[in-house]
Image (spheres, helix red, strand yellow):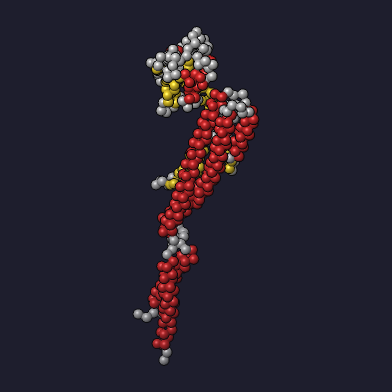
């Protein structure tokens, strides 16, 4: 039916053209923004997920920045500990020199003082962005480096961190009036002794070897190393400076033992003779074991004459200690035994500094791995969000061309439908 009141064809063409125009506008918006879902109305679920993930990714970039700052702090501390280790090695070398006879220990102490000042400078300078983990008097020892950000199934956000305990890293620290840094705390070195080995009879009767092949022997093992045999012969008495190779006093007996230990290549064992009881004992800064003594030949010098025991082994036990800190180290008036103990103190401090540097090295490694992981995670999240909301430009360009064609055809169809009413006029013309 043809009607001038209702133009059905025009109405249909108009609706089709409007729909095409809407789709064309939507496609042009996707092309201009690059997003398939740019607003909540496009797809509320995807838009919500993308918005949350973009926010998390922006926070992730702050995590990367935190890891960068943490890495700088750790690198600064590690560099300082490495330098401190070298200075402690130099102090150890100075102390070793000071054990020699004839050296001016006062001059060496001046050099050590300069090295101690350098250690303090290194520690105080190990600061980055106001953080100094080596010179630190804070009561709390826990430090955190923000390292991760995660969201669980319920949408709860959790911030993760790398925990660093700086208590073992501090070179100088005083908390509650107590010095606790590696370089300003007291380090104890135990002094070991066997106790009394026996009673010598040298004060009443001079003793000497009857024949050149006579000897008394025993063994000493230090720190669990293989035992070394110590022999006392007529030659030992001669080398010890005895005028007629006869032991007549505690001093002679001490000299003989010292000569025998030296001949056996054993260092660090001191001989002590009790003036009242004439007991013979050994002391050392290391653990050691003295085996039962034995004698051979027809000498008038027997095991008992030298204050040794022929049946028992003696294992050293701690009976005292040397204690000082690197900061208070002073050898100006120190004995040889004390200097040897100080060497061990420095060695222990060196070991602790090395351990601290190893700990920071492990933290450095973890920061590097976490930084790489977070960077890859951010890229993965970006790709995941893109899959949800990004527009496929190839598809959109194809759709644009099709819709533009449809729009042109729609305009043409509407034009034809509008012109149909004019054709009706011709029916009424005579």
- Name above or below for residue 170 compared with residue 204: below
Residue at the image point whose x is 46% and y is 25% from the top: 264
Task: Name the image quarter holding residue 414.
Answer: bottom left
Count of picture labels = 0
- How far across and how far down the image is residue 20, in percent? 42, 71
Q: Residue furthest bottom?
A: 430
Image quadrant holding the C terminus, namely bottom left
Q: Residue at x 59, y 43 (%)?
A: 129
At x 44% / y 66%, what residue is drawn?
A: 393
Viewer can see residue 319: no
Left or right, 135 with reference to 266: right
Decide which of 154, 68 is in the foreground and name it: 68
Vertical relation: 136 (above or below) 269: below
Image quarter hosting the N terminus: bottom left
Task: In the displayed orientation, state which residue is furthest to the left.
Answer: 1
Give coordinates of residue 404: x percent, y percent. 44, 74
* 335 sits left or right of 398 in the view: right
Query: Residue placed farthest to the front in the image?
Result: 211
Residue 180: horizontal and vertical position, in percent? Answer: 55, 29
Image quadrant assignment for residue 76: top right
Q: Residue at x 37, y 80 (%)?
A: 2
Relative depth, front residue between 346 and 186: 346
State whether residue 340 is above or below residue 246.
below
Front-lying residue, 4 or 73: 73
Task: Determine if residue 115 is in view.
Answer: yes
Q: Nearer the viewer, residue 260 or 115?
A: 260
Vertical placement of residue 169 versus 71, above or below: above
Residue 323 located left or right of residue 383: right
């Amino acid at each position: 039916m043809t009607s001038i009141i209702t133009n059905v064809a025009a109405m249909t063409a108009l609706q089709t053209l409007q729909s095409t125009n809407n789709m064309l506008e939507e496609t042009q918006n996707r092309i201009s923004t690059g997003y398939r879902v740019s607003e909540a109305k496009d797809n509320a679920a995807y838009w919500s997920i993308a918005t949350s993930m973009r926010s998390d990714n922006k926070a992730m970039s702050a995590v990367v920045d935190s890891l960068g700052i943490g890495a700088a702090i750790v690198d600064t501390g590690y560099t300082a500990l490495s330098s401190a280790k070298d200075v402690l090695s130099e102090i150890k070398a100075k102390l070793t020199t000071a054990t020699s006879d004839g050296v001016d220990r006062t001059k060496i102490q001046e050099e050590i003082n300069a090295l101690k000042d350098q250690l303090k400078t290194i520690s105080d300078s190990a600061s980055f962005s106001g953080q100094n983990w080596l010179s630190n008097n804070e009561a709390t020892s826990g430090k955190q480096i923000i390292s991760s950000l995660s969201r669980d199934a319920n949408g709860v956000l959790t911030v993760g961190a790398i925990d660093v305990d700086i208590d073992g890293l501090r070179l100088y620290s005083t908390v509650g009036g107590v010095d606790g840094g590696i370089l300003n705390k007291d380090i104890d070195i135990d002094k070991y002794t066997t106790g009394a080995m026996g009673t010598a009879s040298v004060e009443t009767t001079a003793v000497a070897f009857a024949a050149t092949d006579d000897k008394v022997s025993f063994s000493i093992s230090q720190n669990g190393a293989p035992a070394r045999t110590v022999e006392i012969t007529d030659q030992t008495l001669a080398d010890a400076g005895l005028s007629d190779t006869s032991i007549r006093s505690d001093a002679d007996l001490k000299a003989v033992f010292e000569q025998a230990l030296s001949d056996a290549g054993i260092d660090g064992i001191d001989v002590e003779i009790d003036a009242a009881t004439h007991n013979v004992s050994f002391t050392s800064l290391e653990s050691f074991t003295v085996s039962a003594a034995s004698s051979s030949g027809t000498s008038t010098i027997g095991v008992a004459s030298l204050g040794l025991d022929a049946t028992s082994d003696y294992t050293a036990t701690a009976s005292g200690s040397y204690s000082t800190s690197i900061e208070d180290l002073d050898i100006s008036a120190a004995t040889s035994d004390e200097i040897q103990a100080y060497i061990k103190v420095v060695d222990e401090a060196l070991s602790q500094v090395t351990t601290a540097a190893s700990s920071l090295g492990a933290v450095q490694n973890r920061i590097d791995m976490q930084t790489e992981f977070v960077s890859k995670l951010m890229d993965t999240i970006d790709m995941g969000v893109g899959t949800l909301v990004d527009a496929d430009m190839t598809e959109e360009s194809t759709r644009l061309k099709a819709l533009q064609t449809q729009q042109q055809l729609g305009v043409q169809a509407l034009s034809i439908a509008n012109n149909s009413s004019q054709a009706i006029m011709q029916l009424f013309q005579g």
